[in-house]
Amino acid sequence: MTQPNLYVDVHVLQTVPSSNINRDDTGAPKTAQYGGVTRARVSSQAWKHAMREDFADLPQEMQGSRTKDAAALLTAAIQARTGEMSQEDAQALADSVFTAAGVKLDKNRQTGALLLISRGQIAKLADYALSHDTLDKKELKAVLKGDQSLDLALFGRMVADNPELNVEASAQVAHALSTHEIVPEFDYFTAMDDEQPEDNAGAAMLGTVEFNSATLYRYANLNFRELAENLGTTDATEGALDFLKAFLLSMPTGKQNTFANKTLPSYVMVTLREDTPVNLVSAFETPITTRTGYVAKSVDALEKAYTAAEAFVAAPLATLVLATTDTTVGDRVANVDALLARVADVLKRETPDEDANA
């Protein structure tokens, strides 16, 4: 019997002071027009990269590498297993593996685009190459679809050379937007030369840095059934919790040393539902206006949008709230650990015991 979908929606309100955590091609903080005004924006790519940095603390088999040098990684793995094979022979064998799998390499032995590949896949490819005289495309495809790292299972993979190696992403991350209008600001700075003569009062360097401050609405969702297809049910629950924790506590590091802008969320709402993921950014289509801080009014607007959405979608399996302000919806939890524990309880309750890949 086909199991129903199980979506995990994550809504975060987070205040960021003067900062430039995600720059455009001119060095200015990224922005977007929404609701007729300019909003601060942090791209989903920037936040997913920050999350992948947090995944570096996971067990090695759950880590992946997004690189054009997958052939070099495989070469090193082959040599580590043999100890006697020459560099040239190992390179030739690694190249033949990717060619047989339908992944093109250029003259520098690089893939045409970044390829997200897990450490487990590299290890299995090396073992396969050394134990088979003939390389079978279907068998290589199975290797490259199995042993997925968490970032690969969450964010997916597109291989233009061979779409059969694509991995469907189980998570979606929205661009973070400020709940209110922002006005770009500029910091004019100078730098002095410590060794300049005393009779030289001029600056050795001057410039400007653009920045803004904002209360951001951040949203992501996870298709737990898809994650279980990618990782297996046993690993999927732990992977979902790692995803949640990384999304809540990570932050892109652009201009971090200049602004020291690392903050924590003021409000988190997690819903688990079977029908559809729901982005509640419409709560802020009319920008929040205030002279006494944006968080409380943003929480109020978000919870009103959550309540209004109930007219269109089924009631969620659970709604959990972690907040520094008064709230009107969901079950409140005391801290991040308590939030993750409650989410784990729902996932285990709604998930069959058998492995999804069995």
Image (cartoon, grey):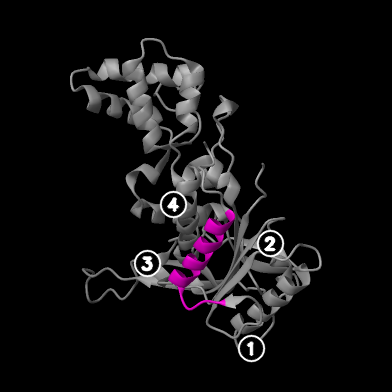
Q: Position of residue 349 (x, y in %)?
A: 56, 58
Residue sitting nearer the eye, 180 or 212 = 180
Dot 3: element: helix
Q: CA distance from mark 1 to mark 3?
A: 29 Å
Circle nearer the viewer, 1 or 2: 2
Q: Amino acid at mark 2?
A: Asn
**Residue named by callout 4:** 52
Instruction: For marks 4 and 2, give the CA distance.
Output: 22 Å
- Mark toward the start of the polypeptide (2 vs 3): 3
Q: Which residue is mark 1?
A: 291
N-term mark: 1 or 3: 3
Query: Which residue lies at the image location 64% right of the left edge and 88% below the top edge?
Result: 291
The amino acid on which the numbered mark 1 sits, given as a three-letter code, is Arg
Magenta residues, dominant SS class: helix
Relative image position of residue 39 (x, y in whole percent): 65, 68
How far apart are labels 1 and 4 at the CA level? Answer: 37 Å
- Identify which amino acid the numbered label 3 is placed on: Asn
Residue 58: in magenta span: no
Residue that carries the numbered disc 2 in the rendered image: 279
Query: Is 233 left, or right, of 180 in this rendering?
Result: left
Indicate the secondary structure of the residue bearing disc 2: loop
Kindly indicate the quadrant of the structure image that contains residue 323.
Answer: bottom right
Marks 2/3: CA distance?
32 Å
Quarter occupied by residue 202: bottom left
The answer to whether residue 220 of the structure is visible from this angle is yes
Which residues lie in the magenta part?
332-350
Residue at 47%, 29% (x, y): give it.
Answer: 144
Which comes before the other along the chain, label 1 or label 2?
Answer: 2
